[in-house]
Image: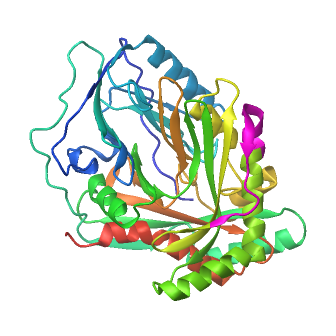
Amino acid sequence: MTSLPTSDQDSAPLAPLVTRTVSLSPEDGAALLALLPATSPRDTTSWVRRGEGLVGWGRAASVTAHGADRFAALEAWWRSVSSSAVVRDEVDLPGTGPVAFGSISYAAESPVGATLVVPSVVIGRRGDQWWVTTTSTDALPPSVLPAAVDDVTAPGEVAFADGSLSPTEWAGAVAEAVTRIQNDELDKVVLARDLDVRTSEPIDVRWLLSRLAENYESTWVFAVDGLVGATPEMLVRREKGLVTSRVLAGTIRRTGDDEHDLALAASLARSSKDLEEHEYAVRSVADALAPHCSSMNVPESPFVLHLSNVMHLATDVAGVLTDDTTSLALAASLHPSAAVCGTPTPVANELISELEHMDRGRYAGPVGWMDARGDGEWGIALRCGAVHHDDDHRMSLYAGCGIVAGSEPESEVAESDAKLIPMRDALTSPRP
């Protein structure tokens, strides 16, 4: 069984956090990711899409929780830390003031656990508005911008190796899952596989982030506590009383030929196998959000989301929040959705444990950020890899596929290969 080392023990601040947010006027042409200085993989944070979002570095405070109550433990810690903080916020937007970045293990029993990190410095951008937030445990703020951002370091020679299962063994697991589904034991299960990576140079998270952002601009490019990736799936966004979620389920690989890809998109939109998989995922999200929302909008039919390497069936679910549930608590109510687990959830989870032969770690768990108001954005940690905490020359990459009665093992292996491409390319692309 492959597993990653666990995080350090909780790091609660010894004194109240002192947080200040002010407007920032960067030079013309500045990019968020280009402002990140060199630091350890665990202390680089990012949540960026189309040049907007948040980046941060350093660690003013952090906490790691384990077990079935890990979401509640993080929520309680953040409520305590943010409510006692001394805050001066001159911008007053979602993502200003105290902000915590988080990544949550898929499984309650995972030794990796769930982590919230409060960076020492956060730089944000929304449209033309830029800001910087500094956080410390004393009155002296940390240095805001480095005098000169260090050169981004390439990973050097990169070697890939099978993870817990070879492609052939994983195809066998898919075949077994299809048999269980056809025997009416469950409707759908999402099976994942891992890939081991070793590099000759220490992994510089900024190298990966910049290449993912360049090649997959419609995704959210993230880094939290050594977990790095580019997810196309927004699990939940909470902003000023509005709750939204983007559901992706049903995938087809692109060819690079626009005319052919349009035909493939049309076939995806008509595919009974993919539509069935997508319906399960949408229903699970809508049912989880309904107790917290009114005026729910659940489109009857999905649209096809075109990414650079694959296309997905996608549905945007929206609702008006009727209580004070935070974005993290909403993420907890949605996890695990049918898009990363299956249906029925308990049966699918048992089959995942039986057939995958690995610890997913924080792959397929919520990843994102939350501010002191409870607003925030949480994606699903897909198209990602985790830098090992005890060896920054090593990563584990992950990819998964939704398995239903009509799934074919060879096709699912090909789909998982396509989903590994973003991280593989980010690691091996040459220096520009």
Nearest to the observer: residue 235 or residue 362 = 235
Task: Find residue 262 and report its image quarter.
Answer: bottom right
- In the rendered image, residue 282, in percent from the top left (x then y), is placed at 73, 55
Q: Quadrant of the N terminus?
A: bottom right
Q: Is residue 67 visible?
A: no
Q: Is residue 53 above or below residue 250?
A: above
Where is residue 142 shown, x and y percent of the image? 21, 25
Q: State which quadrant residue 165 falls in.
A: bottom right
Rendered view: 202 above or below 258: above
In the picture, which quadrant includes the C terminus?
A: bottom left
- Residue 307, above or below 1: below
Residue at the right extreme, as displayed:
184
**Residue 302 within the segment the image draws in magenta:** yes
Identify the colour scheme used. rainbow
Based on the picture, tell me whether residue 399 belongs to the magenta stretch.
no
Residue furthest to the left in view is 147
* Residue drawn at (26%, 13%) of the image: 138
Judged left or right of residue 112, residue 389 is left
Looking at the picture, tell me which residue is in the foreground, 279 or 364. Answer: 279
Image-based side of 109 in relation to 90, left or right? right
Q: Is residue 246 visible?
A: yes
Q: Which residues are drawn in magenta?
A: 287-303
Q: Residue at x 57, y 26 (%)?
A: 75
